[in-house]
Amino acid sequence: MVEFEFDPDWGRIGWMTLGVVLGLAVLWVLYSFVGTFVFALFIYYSTRRVHGHVRDRVGQRSVSAALALFALALPAVLLLLYATAIGL
């Protein structure tokens, strides 16, 4: 007859459980901010092309970045704030 000996390392199991719980907590936090991340990616990729055109005309990177953000991101944020105000 085959006998199995079960002698778990409770310290290791406790650390693994803690790691899984912390990993799930991090995933939950990231999941709650998915919309914010998607909006940030949209702003990044939409202002990137405009930033290149403005930088060619202005010459300074920081000024062209600010102008690109004001040209595209500010109206999108204002539209989002307006929709939120209407929804409340």
Image: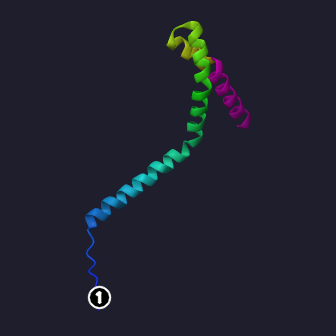
How many dots with numbers? 1
Residue under the image location 57 percent in, 7 percent down: 58
In the picture provided, is 82 more to the left or to the right than 63?
right
The quarter in which the N terminus is drawn is bottom left
Q: Main secondary structure of the magenta part?
A: helix
Q: Where are the magenta residues, as a range? A: 71-88
Q: Position of residue 40 (x, y in %)?
A: 57, 32
Residue 48 drawn above or below residue 86: above
The quarter in which the C terminus is drawn is top right
In the picture provided, is 15 more to the left or to the right than 49?
left
**Residue 64 part of the magenta segment:** no
Residue under label 1: 2
Q: Position of residue 67 (x, y in %)?
A: 59, 14
What is the three-letter code of the residue carrying label 1? Answer: Val
Q: Quadrant of residue 34?
A: top right
Q: Position of residue 65 (x, y in %)?
A: 55, 17
Residue 47 drawn above or below residue 26: above
User: Which residue occupies the foreground of this view, 62 or 51?
Assistant: 51
Residue 72 drawn above or below residue 31: above
